[in-house]
Amino acid sequence: MRLRRIRPLTTLIALATVAGLALSGCGGGSTPAGGASTGQGAERTVKHAMGETKVPANPQRVVVLDTGELDSVLALGVTPVGAVTTEVSADFPAYLKDRLKDTKRVGTIPAPNFDRITEARPDLILSNKVRHAQHYDKLSQIAPTVFADQIGSTWRETFLLYADALGKKGDAEKLLAQYRDRAKQVGQQLGDPASKKVSAVRFVTGAQTIRAYTPNSFLGTVLADVGVARPQSQQGEKVFQDISRENIGQLDGDVLIYASFGDPEKSGEKAVTEMPQWKSLGAVRAGKASRVDDDHFYVGLGLLAANRILDDLKGILK
């Protein structure tokens, strides 16, 4: 911000102090009210789903409003000052929790707490259109805000976007290359991964059906990178297919992975896995049905979660 020369000197000093506390907002030119200054003044322009936003050259106080964003910043060595949790838990994802001891909870994914976000004094906010398109303008008044367009299967692209906002795109590209190499190695260890059909199942609190996840989901992309095949019931452009309890047979595969979003009793997992139809699935009878951690298999949506999945698949698929 440029200021004209104004006398007396005390007035000039007061105005300069106010200017030093202001942060540049989105490309529309609005000035965030709640952000903390980096003290450097240098900025970069980032193109994202909502347009262009000027962000600090080296963000110091980052707030993230979804799990993919949380995973991504931690993968890049940045501990956020604020983050949300899912609506079924007051805790951060189990696989990340130990790294978030100094991170404040600022609401849930569907209901971010704007007062807490402001109190965190962010100089950068990261989220996406899927979750928070309606909140973008309000968030941008707090601090420069960068949004991804989609979530889930586009996790690699969104990881690069957030890395760009953090000034760490080169680091992100190297990390993605390492992940691709690891996924290929896991597939090679199977000998012929394409000959093995892997079923990805999730029980969700509040849902009336069982979800069978497709290649167009986060977990689906990791399985594709390994090179395994998928059951016919788990194809298509949707993120998941809804399977009724009457059609449990459609969940079968050579290997079956399943998890619960929320309490297993409330999600329906306990009831379904005790049904004769479930127990008669080929994967279950062969001892190839594995209950996995929902936090990194389905919630995480980022590089750290993807690498944890690869670690688990080594044992699950052998």
Image: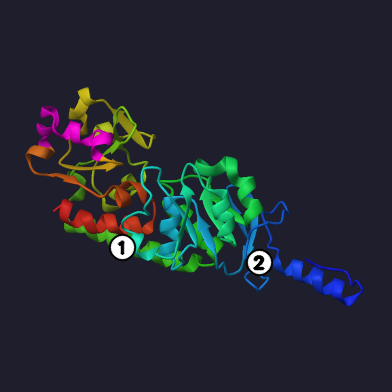
Task: Using residue 293 as the reference point, say whether residue 290 is left or right of it.
Answer: left
Q: Is 306 placed left or right of 273 in the picture? A: right
The furthest residue to the top: 246
Indicate whether 15 appears above or below 26: below
**Chain part drawn in magenta:** 264-282
Q: What kind of secondary structure does the magenta stretch mostly adopt?
A: helix
Q: Which residue is mark 1?
A: 181
Q: Position of residue 75 (x, y in %)?
A: 40, 64
Q: Residue at x 72, y 69 (%)?
A: 20
Q: Is residue 273 magenta?
A: yes
In depth, the one of 171 and 82 nearer the eye is 82
**Camera-side residue: 267 or 2?**
267
Image quarter in which the N terminus is found: bottom right
- Figure disc tally: 2
In the orientation shown, which residue stands out farthest toward the bottom?
9
Q: Residue at x 68, y 71 (%)?
A: 41
As shown in the figure, which amino acid type bears the numbered disc 1? Asp
- For disc 2, the marked residue is 43
Q: Label 2 is placed on what type of residue? A: Glu
Identify the element where label 2 is drawn: strand
The residue tagged with tag 1: helix, strand or loop? helix
Report the colour scheme.
Answer: rainbow
Q: Percent position (x, y) of residue 271? A: 19, 31
